[in-house]
Amino acid sequence: MQPDQVAGIDRLERSGYLSVLRGLVKSHTCPIWWYDDRRAVGRSILHSGTVAFVNTGCKVIAITANHVYEQYLKDKRENADLKCQFGNMTVEPERYAISADANLDVSTFELPRVLATATGVTTHNAATWPPAELHESELIVLGGYPGNRRSENRHTVNSDFVSFISRVGQSSDDHVSIHLNMPESHWPQGERLENSPDLGGISGGPVFRIRSEPLETIEFAGTIYESSQMYELVLMRHASHIQADGTIRQ
């Protein structure tokens, strides 16, 4: 991101607009984690990720990275007593799975309305489905819940939502890449991260395009499936791979 673009975003931050935007993005997501409550505090959580809720116009679906879901299934096979949380709600995600694709690394779920509401998430309502694919240089906002910014207490878990505003670096039919080089990317949390931040746990988080016409708004564009600490990259799958009923197509 160019210096003048960063300066413009800084002005929006000071005006209070970006805090509203961040809050909106955060409202559509929650952390997903699973744990063994027989273990000591600080050691009970096995793994975690991020999930977003979207209304396609046909169905309300929860979307995360497939490797997050597969890791949960693996851990559950080894320990049947594990409990899984979607935000505020204990959920057995395997009961509500719609579709999973290991190659695209995306999984979808349909939770009953009462469970979806209990997670604490406000569903994002897509204007159309599928959304248009992202293109190079488009302005986007993405977010999720890195595990290293999580604190565990006896009966609660505090997860720090982190978000970035940046531009698409590269887009293809297969994936989108977003370069989070710290000197050139904006961290709209009122702080700057060190180089090569550990974003493990952000997988499954949403990427939204920022639209300015006809009104300032955000539009769900896809799902984060990988982050590279070494190369400061976030990789995303287009939402167009997900059909309105939640099934996934190549």
Image (cartoon, rainbow, N blue to C red):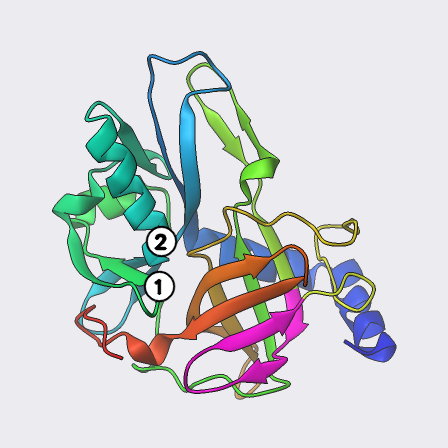
Image: magenta residue range: 165-179
Mark 2: secondary structure: helix
**x, y percentage for residue 180?**
69, 65
Q: Nearer the viewer, residue 215 or 31?
A: 31
Provide the major secondary structure of the magenta segment: strand
The dot on residue 105 is 1
Q: Tag 1's secondary structure?
A: loop
Given the image, on which type of amino acid does mark 2 rest? His
Mark earlier in primary sequence (2, 1): 2
| Residue 165 higher or lower than 28, as above or below | below
Where the N terminus falls, by quadrant?
bottom right
Few, some or many residues within 10 Å of mark 1 (<14, 14–19, 20+): many
Q: CA distance from mark 2 to mark 1?
A: 6 Å
Q: Nearer the viewer, residue 205 or 213?
A: 205
**Is residue 137 shown to the viewer in this render?**
yes
Residue 131 location, x and y as percent? 37, 82
Q: Please name the residue that numbered disc 2 is placed on.
A: 67
Instruction: Name the residue: 17% across, 45% down.
Output: 94
Q: Residue at x 82, y 78 (%)?
A: 2
Above or below, 89 relative to 70: above
Is residue 145 located in the magenta-colored stretch of the structure?
no
In-image side of 65 versus 145 (left or right):
left
